[in-house]
Amino acid sequence: MLDKARHIVVEGPIGAGKTSLARRLAERLDATTCLEAPEQNAFLSRFYFDMARHALPTQIAFLLQRVDMLSALSGTDFEQQRVVSDFLLAKDPLFAAMNLDPAEHALYQDLYRRLEPRSPKPDLVIYLQADPITLMNRVRNRGLDAERRITQSYLARVADQYTTFFHDFDAAPLFVVDAQVLNPVDIPEDFELLVERLRAMRSYREFFGYAE
């Protein structure tokens, strides 16, 4: 599966390690990266300080950023080069539904429908799954100023939304990694195991690192 995939997406909640893994995979596969730039979202740190007040501009800023990045890679670019991304546009409404009030959510949905680019669907999605304690520890360890007000309860809500989203996900082959058991970002042996399992992947949905 891995060797044939041209458009690979690494997804997961805040702190799961999706951006770091996307970079490592891109380096291994000699692929182009398409990575979010949360530091360029001027509303993000304000959102964690006052979510109700700043949720809508934060969400719109991320949506515009993601649409612009995918639009830049549309057309023949996806056919001529391999791309590894750390976001799935179809997941964008997840945060909107969680953080916006009904009127704001309706406005967001209208904007999403108008802006959604016609980008090819991923050939492979890697979902990093972890519990809120693991996510909280990783967020604290990376020490980003914009994230210092994130709470474990918020991460629990995010993790639950991701679990629900990917439970019914069937838009592309899905490889689920238990990031609590295996750490392909920081442990070289785990990364090599992941690459090996991705290359051997045959079914539409597989799991990696889950204790029996």
Image (cartoon, rainbow, N blue to C red):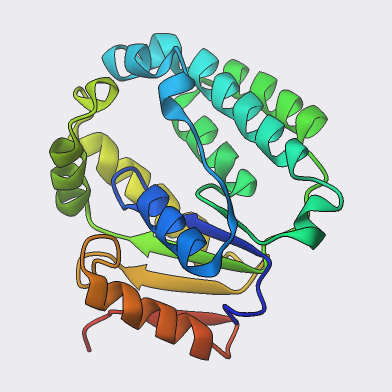
In the displayed structure image, the side of residue 204 where residue 161 appears, left or right? left
Q: Residue furthest right?
A: 75
Where residue 72 sits: x, y (%)?
Answer: 75, 37
- Image quadrant containing the C terminus: bottom left
Q: Quadrant of residue 8?
A: bottom right
Q: Residue at x 86, y 49 (%)?
A: 75
Q: Residue at x 33, y 82 (%)?
A: 193
Is 186 placed above or below 68 here? Answer: below
Where residue 66 sits: x, y (%)?
Answer: 62, 34
Viewer-side residue, 154 vs 195: 195
Where residue 67 sits: x, y (%)?
Answer: 69, 33
In the displayed structure image, the side of residue 114 where residue 204 appears, left or right? left
Residue 12 appears in view: no
Viewer-side residue, 20 vs 157: 20
- Image quadrant containing the N terminus: bottom right
Where residue 58 sits: x, y (%)?
Answer: 49, 19
Number of marks in the rendered image? 0
Q: Residue at x 67, y 79 (%)?
A: 4
Residue 65 appears in view: yes
In the displayed structure image, the side of residue 211 where residue 30 appears, left or right? right
Is 22 placed above or below 204 here? Answer: above
Viewer-side residue, 74 vs 149: 74
Q: Quadrant of residue 99?
A: top left
Viewer-side residue, 46 vs 66: 66
Is 138 placed above or below 151 here? Answer: below
Q: Residue at x 57, y 78 (%)?
A: 2
Is 86 placed above or below 126 here? Answer: above
